[in-house]
Amino acid sequence: MEKCNIEKKNLKEQFLDLFKFEDYWSILLATLILIFSLITFFLVKPDNLNSMIAKQNDIMVEESLKAPFKTVTWHEAQIAKNKLNISNNFINSIKSVLDKPKSWVNNPMESIILTEKGAAAKGLPYKEKYEKALQNSQMKKTEALALEKMAQDHGFNNPQLNQEAIGAIDGWLDSISVADKLKSKAIVKPYNHLPTLAILGIFICLYFSMGMKKMGRSTGNFFKGFPCVFALSILAYLLGAQVTMKAWGLEYVFWGLVLGLIISNTIGTPKVVLEAAQTEYYIKTGLILLGSTVLINKVLLIGIPGIFVTWVVTPVVLVLTFTFGDKIIKMESKSLNMVMSADMSVSGVSAAIAAAAACKAKKEELTLSVGISIMFTAFMMIAMPMIIKKIGMDPVLGGAWIGGTIDSTGAVVAAGEYLGPVARDVAATIKMIQNVIIGVMALGVAAYWSLKVDTSMAKESDFSFKGSLQEIWKRFPKFILGFIGASILFSGIYSLLGTEVSKIIIDKGVVKAIVSPLQGWLFCLAFTSIGLSTNFAALGKHFKGGKPIILYLVGKVINLSVTFAMAYVMFHIAFPEITKSLMDL
């Protein structure tokens, strides 16, 4: 009995000892946030949500049986269904606290505070345009209904009348889109983000302080230094919200790095601030939250071509780029080589973070990789869609090429949008499928590093099959388990609820209202922390011979070439019917 008690005590101690490590605290904090978010939205879900969706679906089915094209009534039902969401005062308060600084043109204070007078002045230039757009939309609807009626009177057997009705309906939909865009500019509500930013800062500070003492860090110094890190993160968001900067892709990640680097390389980062610059803690928690948006069932939407363009091409590009850096230009730092290779081949910043954790790269190496990536991403998000449009490439192939090669998810969507909704949706889906393998990539990098690169403890280690697995587990970044777990959990919920209910509760609710905004703040804190912890003198040695730039350029050429070849084969030769169906959506 005594022995049994000792064993139980030992197991308990072993479990508690896990929380001496950052990865397990990241998993715990992210899990609590996800559970809270799910409970919040499930508690306020209307009992008749399914019937509201079914009502609109019934209308759409009835209309699809009536006409050989999507009628005005069909589109109205679709619009009504898309407007369904879950909200109450508590949820709106959470969204307000997590809200980031607004966009601005000339006055940065408008990003934080906008008075009633200022809101009225900001919306005034667009008010008349919005009213005219509403009138035009109503006129277009009347025209579309009239042409639809003419087509119906002929039993929908007159191709010319059918086509005229379709054209009129498309014109009406375009007018709705124009009116909606003008509405957001014409109807401007006043806001004051100062109180909500203070609440957010206090929450994050208290929430992330919970594990400090257990991890052997100073809770007091974290409290003292956090206000400075958070203030810089707010400034980074503010600068990234400037309209011109945002258009060039210079968003909060870039500015967080820049602001941190300026301080660390001029006046120097105070030690107490460095105590709050918990780069990996913020990043790991944010990545686990990201896992909730990577849904396995969404991968299936684009089919086998998407799988080949991402899951086949991505590891090939990673291996070829790493091999080029290691064998051809002989990069001095293998970890920098791996982080940059993962950055350009998988999905930019998120992949670089995961790879850096897996191969234990230095903070300055991650900073360098992300900095180069951001510069090239800003260029590619503008150049690629222009080139695709110039050569007349179809939107499916163009979207797949963009999705597989541009690093940032936001830049992918922006570049795809330039080519139209089909290219945008294909590009976003390809990038989402690519994001799925971040965890697998990190596992592979950790395994390779443990067994082939970091052999400093090879004499003491057991490299039998069992010993190798133990070594991999020892070095494996445990937070990746949280990422994969979140993905599996939310994929399961999505399947249980069904796509349409899940879009309202998960996509528009949990993810859009809580998870994604908080993840953005954590990433902003992380990259500000990287800048505060990085010295240019340490970065300088990595630029010897311009090798990082050469590695990125060659790797990007490999990525562009292999991705285009695979996308062309998959979408034009092997599965042209999938391309046709995507074009018809």
Image (cartoon, rainbow, N blue to C red):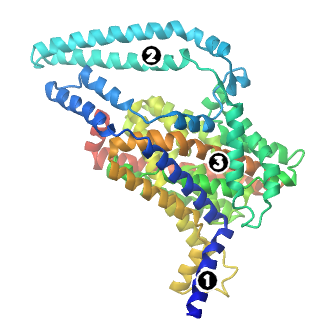
Q: Residue at x 29, y 50 (%)?
A: 574
Whether 184 is drawn above or below 529: the answer is: above
Q: Is residue 119 left or right of residue 53?
A: right
Residue indicated by mark 2 = 179
Name the amino acid type tagged 1.
Answer: Lys
Using a 10 Å C-alpha cutoff, classify the residue at mark 1 as few (fewer than 14 neighbours), some (14 to 19) or many (20 or more): few
Judged from this view, the residue extending furthest toward the front is 1
Q: Do the CB atoms of the residues marked 1 and 3 lie less than 8 Å apart?
A: no
Name the amino acid type tagged 2.
Answer: Ala
Observer-nearest residue: 202 or 363? Answer: 202
Quadrant where the image shows the C terminus: top left
Name the amino acid type tagged 3.
Answer: Leu
Residue indicated by mark 3 = 522
Q: How far apart, in angstroms, are the residues tagged by discs 3 and 2?
A: 35 Å
Residue 225: x percent and y percent?
81, 50
Q: Do the CB atoms of the residues marked 3 and 2 lie less than 8 Å apart?
A: no
**Disc 3 on helix, strand or loop?**
helix
Q: Nearer the viewer, mark 2 or mark 1?
A: 1
Q: Is residue 57 left or right of residue 510?
A: left
Residue 380 is marked as: none
Whether 575 is drawn above or below 94: the answer is: below
